[in-house]
């Protein structure tokens, strides 16, 4: 009898811990989705940026991007994604070519990788706005 009572207590404790962990996971997902949904973007005038290579990042917990942006002659010359931690958003990396071609961060997101697209755009925008030289 004591053995089954002890086992029951252990099972209840495990279920409580699992419930707390699951609840925290879903709260984290909800916060991440809200952060991405409320993300805003600025219109960056690349022609006004001094030539150089700049670094920017954006972290929304489930997606993280660290980007290096090279500006030459008022144009985005090169964008390198130094890090892109994502779940299934690797296809979003194609927007880098669009940003270079259009000389802007104001490009469409990639269908099926919208959140990663937004985080990449924000990391590049942060590099151009903050203008922290990459060393």
Image: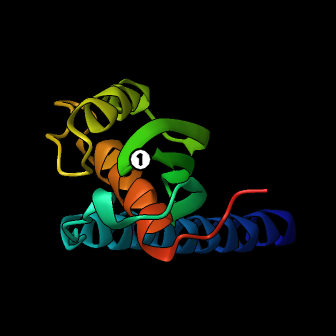
Q: Which residue is mark 1?
A: 73
Identify the residue at image location x=58%, y=74%.
Answer: 16
Residue 60 visible here? no
Identify the residue at image location x=19%, y=40%.
Answer: 109
Identify the residue at image location x=29%, y=52%.
Answer: 118
Residue 126 x/y as whole percent: 44, 67
Left or right of residue 133, residue 16 in this image? left
> Closest to the observer: 87 or 46?
46
Residue 82 x/y as whole percent: 65, 41
Residue 103 x/y as whole percent: 26, 42
Considering the numbered disc 1 on the image, is that residue within a helix, a strand or a loop? loop
Q: Quadrant of the C terminus?
A: bottom right
Residue 12 visible here? yes
Q: Is residue 64 above or below residue 113?
A: below
> Closest to the observer: 97 or 133?
133
Colouring used for the render: rainbow
Q: Which quadrant of the figure has residue 84?
A: top right
Q: Quadrant of the N terminus?
A: bottom right
Q: Residue furthest right?
A: 3
Residue 25 x/y as whole percent: 48, 64
Left or right of residue 110, residue 91 in this image? right
> Closest to the observer: 128 or 28?
128
Identify the residue at image location x=44%, y=69%.
Answer: 28
Q: Residue furthest front?
A: 73
Left or right of residue 103, residue 28 in this image? right
Q: How many marks?
A: 1
């Amino acid at each position: 009898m004591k053995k089954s009572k002890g086992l029951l207590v252990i099972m209840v404790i495990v279920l409580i811990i699992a419930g707390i962990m699951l609840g925290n996971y879903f709260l984290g997902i909800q916060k991440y989705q809200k952060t991405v949904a409320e993300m805003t973007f600025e219109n960056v005038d690349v022609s006004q940026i001094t030539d150089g290579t700049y670094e920017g990042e954006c972290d929304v917990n489930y997606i993280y991007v660290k980007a290096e942006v090279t500006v030459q002659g008022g144009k985005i010359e090169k964008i390198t994604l130094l890090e892109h931690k994502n779940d299934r958003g690797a296809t979003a990396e194609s927007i880098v070519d669009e940003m270079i071609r259009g000389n802007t961060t104001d490009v469409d997101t990639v269908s099926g990788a919208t959140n990663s697209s937004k985080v990449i755009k924000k990391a590049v925008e942060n590099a151009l706005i903050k203008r922290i030289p990459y060393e």
